[in-house]
Image: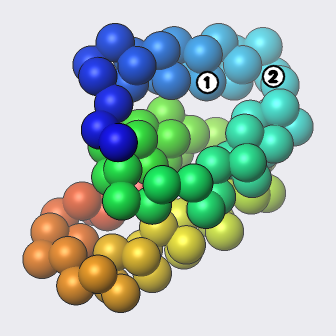
Amino acid sequence: MKLTEYELDSIFDYIDYLLRKGKFKTVDAILDAEYDSDLDNIDEKLAYLTITAAASSKLKNRAKFYVNFENHLIDTENPEKDKLLIGLK
């Protein structure tokens, strides 16, 4: 299911709030919960990867989240894979 702009903004706002408060364990738990959920929702996965990029060194589940999404893009032969993932590792 494709998310609305409002829903994507809500993800950005909430994760940004948690990161600013130093709640890295909470963000890690969210990434873990979202790990396998609706991998075809590219916008949602990109939202999580984008908003957490700056804090990646403090988020132990982010690398696993990234690899899982990258593998999904490879498995589905998404022609935009490289373009989508620029700067998100």
Sequence-wise, the earlier of marks 2 and 1 is 1
Residue 49, given in percent of the width and then of the height, sits at: 48, 47
In the depicted structure, whether residue 50 falls above or below residue 57: above
Residue 55, given in percent of the width and then of the height, sits at: 64, 40
Farthest residue in the left direction? Answer: 79
Q: Which residue is mark 1?
A: 15
Q: Quadrant of the N terminus?
A: top left
Residue 30, given in percent of the width and then of the height, sits at: 72, 39
- Of circles 2 and 1, the one toward us is 1
Q: Secondary structure at mark 1?
A: helix
Q: Quadrant of residue 35?
A: bottom right
In the depicted structure, whether residue 69 falls above or below residue 60: below
Mark 2–mark 1 distance (CA, rounded to whole Å): 11 Å
Taking depth in this image into account, of 56 and 31 the one nearest to the observer is 31
Q: Which mark is residue 3?
A: none
Q: Quadrant of residue 71?
A: bottom left
Residue 20, given in percent of the width and then of the height, sits at: 69, 15
The answer to whether residue 45 of the structure is visible from this angle is yes
Q: Secondary structure at mark 2?
A: loop
Which residue is at 61% across, 62% downward? 36
**Circle 1 residues within 10 Å: few <14, some 14–19, many ≥20:** many
Q: Quadrant of residue 62?
A: bottom right
Farthest residue in the front direction? Answer: 1
Looking at the image, residue 51 sits to the left or right of residue 30; the answer is left
In the depicted structure, whether residue 3 falls above or below residue 89: above
Q: Which residue is mark 2?
A: 22
Which residue is at 41% across, 56% downward? 88
Farthest residue in the right direction? Answer: 25
Q: Amino acid at mark 2?
A: Gly
Taking depth in this image into account, of 20 and 84 the one nearest to the observer is 84
Looking at the image, residue 85 sits to the left or right of residue 80; the answer is right
The answer to whether residue 46 of the structure is visible from this angle is no
